[in-house]
Image (cartoon, rainbow, N blue to C red):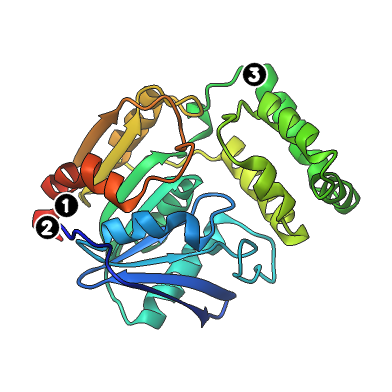
Amino acid sequence: MLHAQPPTHKTYFIDLPLTRLHILEAGEGAPLIMVPATISELHNWLPLAQFMAQWFHVYFFELPGHGQSEPFREQFSSQRVAELVGQLADELGYERFSLMGFSFGGILTMRTFQLLSARVDRVVLIAPCLDHRALPFSSFRVSVLHRFNQLLSYPKVQKSFYQLIHNEYTVSMVVKVLQKIGHLEQTMPLEKKLLNTTPNTISVLNAQINEILTTEFEVTPIKHETPCYFAMSVYDPLLRFDVTLNIVHNHFENVNAVPLLYPFHQPPGAFTYEELNRNFYKTVNTFIGANA
């Protein structure tokens, strides 16, 4: 049912075997665990969490090493995040739940689904990064990204990079370089995010970039029957729409796809709760509402 006012929410910490998570919770009903994109903090996702809380009991967490969540004691990996989601669901007391991911959260969602598919009721993918083959980059650009990321894996390079992005005179130069080699949208607030980035986050980003450049999920002989809801702009500048949709169809038998027409991968500014209701409520309610 459409709520004129955003559902109430709360934030808190949960201690799990793998790490301590900073959690956002909103709504009631069947559980939906939203897995984050890169450098995502609770306030970035609050409107979307409250929007989805009209159908679900929503849980969103900051990735280990991002925001106020503590980093993994071992190296960051999507497989470790999948294990973490299982621990979170156990701690919350849920045997079954739904999953939702945006951008890099697509890799995290699929990795979690692979590990916990028997517990997942539905999968929601929004402009998901699922496979390196969906990147619209030339082989030369991919090679440059690989080399840059390999350099960033060295502690001394990470320390120098940290100093560059925490200097107000050099951070803008770093942003321009990243936008050039990574084909990142100029509307992304990279400068502000980098200025607040911790050394732990840089190490996590290094691992995430490596997965973006190398991930390719194995296709099983029999497609999963779990319902999958997919939305992405056909004009997405960071990921190929047709390749991504084909990958989704390779894994899921029951796909509800919604092509969007936005000229960006990530909105220049987060959609407000009111904007989400105005633009997406009917679509989400049609695909998800009846089964939530």
Q: Are marks 2 and 3 in contact (CB under 8 Å)?
A: no
State the residue lying farthest toward the left.
Answer: 290
SS at circle 3: helix
Q: Position of residue 100 (x, y in %)?
A: 35, 54
SS at circle 2: helix
Mark earlier in primary sequence (2, 3): 3
Q: Position of residue 278 (x, y in %)?
A: 22, 43
Q: For mark 3, does the 10 Å Cα neighbourhood hold few (<14), some (14 to 19), or many (20 or more) residues?
A: few
Look at the picture and state if 14 lies above or below 266. below
CA gap, disc 1 and disc 3: 39 Å
Mark earlier in primary sequence (1, 3): 3
Residue that numbered label 3 is attached to: 139
SS at circle 1: loop
CA gap, disc 2 and disc 3: 43 Å
* Labelled disc at residue 288: 1
Q: Are marks 1 and 3 in contact (CB under 8 Å)?
A: no
Look at the picture and state if 131 lies above or below 164. above
Residue that numbered label 2 is attached to: 291
The amino acid type of the residue labelled 3 equals Ser
Q: For mark 1, does the 10 Å Cα neighbourhood hold few (<14), some (14 to 19), or many (20 or more) residues?
A: some
| Quadrant for the N terminus in the image | bottom left
